[in-house]
């Protein structure tokens, strides 16, 4: 659980600078903060699924789910994708990242999303209900340094076994990969 006084809520436009600062600090690079901005400016952005963690009026974490495309046997469909997740380095190991993931996936479920995909630590995300995506016929192309289990999915209330295929990242991620 996050420490007392930390709340998760949807981002507001006046949070953007603080979000950029947290993301840059968390990753040690401004590139990930630019990725967040590029997602926010794209047609793939889902405003309700960009969530901040706030402590005493300060933004200490951020996560977003945007749409990617799932190319499957029944054509293409949008699919929810979690990325990036960032917690201020001074606030790590307090449950804030877990709270952000739980909050944003619950909101995605409430919006009717059938699943959320991501690439990330199986140890961390596995504790939150994510599983290896190939178990459900979801293929995610990973960077060469990532283990195959980093391709993950969490099934939500509207999940159906017919939702299968290969995840195609939106343009904001393709541009980011070129950094």
Image: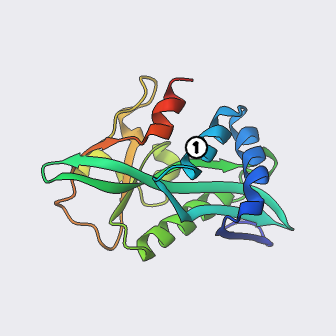
How many other residues sit within 10 Å of disc 1, few (<14), some (14-19) or many (≥20)?
A: some
Picture quarter containing residue 109?
Answer: bottom left
Model colouring: rainbow
Name the residue rendered at 73%, 54% in the picture.
16
Q: Which residue is mark 1?
A: 38
- Total labels drawn: 1
Would you place residue 12 above or below residue 33 in this image? below
Q: Position of residue 110 (x, y in %)?
A: 44, 76
Q: Position of residue 11 (x, y in %)?
A: 67, 64
Name the residue rendered at 39%, 32% in the picture.
142
Name the residue rendered at 37%, 67% in the picture.
113
Q: Seen in the image, is 150 located left or right of residue 87?
A: left
Would you place residue 3 above or below residue 171 in this image? below
Q: Position of residue 124 (x, y in %)?
A: 53, 49
Of 160 and 12, the residue lying toward us = 12
Quarter of the image that includes the N terminus: bottom right
Q: Secondary structure at mark 1?
A: helix
* Residue sitting at the far left: 73
* Residue sitting at the far right: 56
Picture quarter containing residue 97?
Answer: bottom right
Q: Position of residue 160 (x, y in %)?
A: 21, 66
Quarter of the image that includes the C terminus: top right
Would you place residue 155 above or below residue 70 in this image? below
Would you place residue 37 above or below residue 142 in this image? below
Q: Seen in the image, is 112 located left or right of residue 38?
A: left
């Amino acid at each position: 659980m996050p420490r007392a006084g930390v709340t998760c809520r949807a981002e507001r436009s006046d949070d953007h600078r603080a979000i950029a600062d947290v993301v840059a600090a968390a990753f040690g690079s401004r590139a990930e903060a630019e990725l967040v901005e590029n997602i926010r400016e794209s047609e793939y952005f889902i405003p309700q699924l960009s969530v901040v963690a706030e402590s005493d009026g300060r933004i200490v974490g951020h996560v977003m789910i945007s749409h990617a495309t799932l190319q499957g046997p029944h054509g293409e469909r949008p699919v929810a994708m979690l990325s990036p997740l960032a917690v201020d380095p001074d606030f790590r190991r307090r449950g804030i990242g877990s709270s952000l993931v739980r909050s944003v996936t619950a909101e995605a479920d409430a919006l009717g999303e059938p699943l959320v995909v991501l690439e990330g630590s199986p140890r961390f995300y596995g504790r939150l209900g994510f599983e290896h995506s190939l178990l459900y016929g979801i293929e995610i192309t990973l960077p060469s340094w990532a283990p195959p289990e980093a391709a993950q999915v969490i099934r939500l209330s509207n999940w159906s076994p017919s939702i299968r295929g290969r995840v195609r990242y939106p343009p904001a991620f393709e541009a980011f990969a070129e950094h």
